[in-house]
Image (cartoon, rainbow, N blue to C red):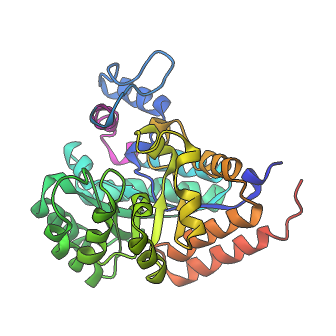
């Protein structure tokens, strides 16, 4: 058995609708009479060519999830896949806007997802949490509405709030109020920055949103002062190498700054973002980065430990996960 399988893994950055396997989308499309032929090819892969067509494919595939039971099936399927790759913990971004488009209330959306997560946990012992996201290009009023919905309908598995969508739309200052409300309610906070936006987008997210975690953040490598700030403030980056390459942020994994960031002392985690769209999985992220940059078993363990320490979960859960991680060191390699 290889290191890639035996290393316990943890994921902090995955959009649940973007984790839908094409087979599941096709099955539900047939059940609901939804046409997804424009975004699925004959060999069962998603069709897209750039960021705009990716978003269209994403929304079309998401449209087949119409009931709490559909979302339960999606969450159960994804968490079982994660567990099969050796993951002990996963956080998923959930999109109340997609639920609303499907005609579901926020509460029934969350309860559906939670039911699927619990089923996967019963069989595999994988822990999971949810991070509700506001969509940047929908504007500050929309993002604040989602924070209020999350706070007004508390659920034990919804432990975080984040900002996604087009980084080039709307300055982080516009969303400062929403993030302040989330933090005051005890939610962990994270924001996408430094993916399509440059280092300045990372700085703005830190200044105005006061986050301790950043989705992507890799463009920080272009600014030495910012790198020092990330290290000093112990900001954790949710790095998604496969996603960055698929979307053309970098041309090849060997040119991706994930290894350089780590060498500079920045806290990084590995994540799959929208796995079937980008031809990846969490396991592939660990194995490809390990192979490309010559990481050891201990290097991979450190990345998982960083993720668990930065996870938006309660301390007893975190401590149990750290015990599970440490116990992996005692397992002899096959």
Compared with 271, 269 (above or below) is below
Residue 10: % across, % down: 58, 62
Residue 47: % across, % down: 39, 25
Residue 9: % across, % down: 64, 60
**Can residue 76 be spotted in the picture?**
no
Displayed quadrant of residue 134: bottom left
Residue drawn at x 17%, y 63% is: 171
Residue 58 lies in the magenta stretch: yes
Residue 312 relative to residue 254: left or right? left
Is residue 64 or residue 263 the one in the foreground? 263
Q: Residue furthest front?
A: 224
Residue 243 relative to residue 6: left or right? left
Is residue 273 or residue 161 the one in the foreground? 273
Compared with 230, 282 (above or below) is above
Residue 145 relative to residue 321: left or right? left
**Can residue 313 be spotted in the picture?**
yes
Compared with 155, 58 (above or below) is above
Residue drawn at x 83%, y 48% is: 1
Residue 304: % across, % down: 62, 66
Displayed quadrant of residue 6: bottom right
Give the residues in magenta. 53-70
Is residue 229 or residue 168 the one in the foreground? 229
Residue 118 lies in the magenta stretch: no
User: Secondary structure of the magenta portion, mostly?
Assistant: helix
């Amino acid at each position: 058995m290889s290191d890639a399988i035996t290393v316990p893994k943890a994921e902090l950055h995955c959009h649940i609708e973007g984790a839908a396997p094409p087979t599941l989308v096709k099955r539900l499309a047939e059940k609901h009479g939804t046409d997804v032929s424009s975004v699925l090819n004959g060999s069962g892969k998603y069709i897209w060519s750039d960021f705009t067509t990716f978003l269209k494919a994403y929304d079309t595939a998401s449209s087949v999830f119409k009931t709490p039971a559909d979302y339960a099936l999606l969450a159960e399927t994804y968490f079982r896949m994660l567990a099969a790759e050796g993951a002990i913990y996963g956080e998923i971004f959930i999109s109340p806007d997609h639920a609303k488009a499907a005609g579901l209330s926020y509460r029934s959306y969350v309860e559906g997802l939670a039911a699927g997560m619990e089923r996967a946990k019963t069989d595999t012992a994988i822990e999971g949490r949810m991070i509700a996201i506001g969509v940047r290009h929908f504007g500050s009023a929309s993002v604040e509405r989602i924070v209020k919905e999350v706070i007004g309908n508390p659920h034990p598995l919804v432990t975080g709030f984040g900002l996604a969508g087009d980084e080039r739309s709307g300055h982080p200052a516009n969303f400062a109020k929403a993030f302040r409300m989330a933090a005051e309610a005890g939610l962990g906070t994270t924001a996408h920055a430094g993916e399509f936006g440059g280092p300045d987008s990372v700085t703005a997210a830190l200044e105005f949103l006061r986050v301790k975690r950043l989705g992507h953040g890799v463009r920080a490598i272009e600014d030495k002062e910012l790198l020092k700030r990330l290290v000093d403030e112990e900001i954790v980056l949710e790095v998604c190498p496969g996603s960055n390459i698929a979307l053309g942020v970098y041309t090849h994994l060997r040119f991706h700054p994930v290894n350089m960031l780590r060498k500079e002392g920045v806290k990084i985690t590995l994540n799959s973002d929208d796995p079937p769209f980008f031809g990846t999985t969490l396991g592939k992220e660990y194995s490809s980065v390990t192979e490309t940059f010559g990481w050891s078993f201990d290097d991979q363990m450190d990345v998982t430990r960083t993720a668990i320490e930065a996870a938006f979960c309660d301390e007893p859960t975190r401590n149990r996960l750290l015990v599970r991680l440490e116990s992996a060191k005692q397992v002899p390699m096959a």
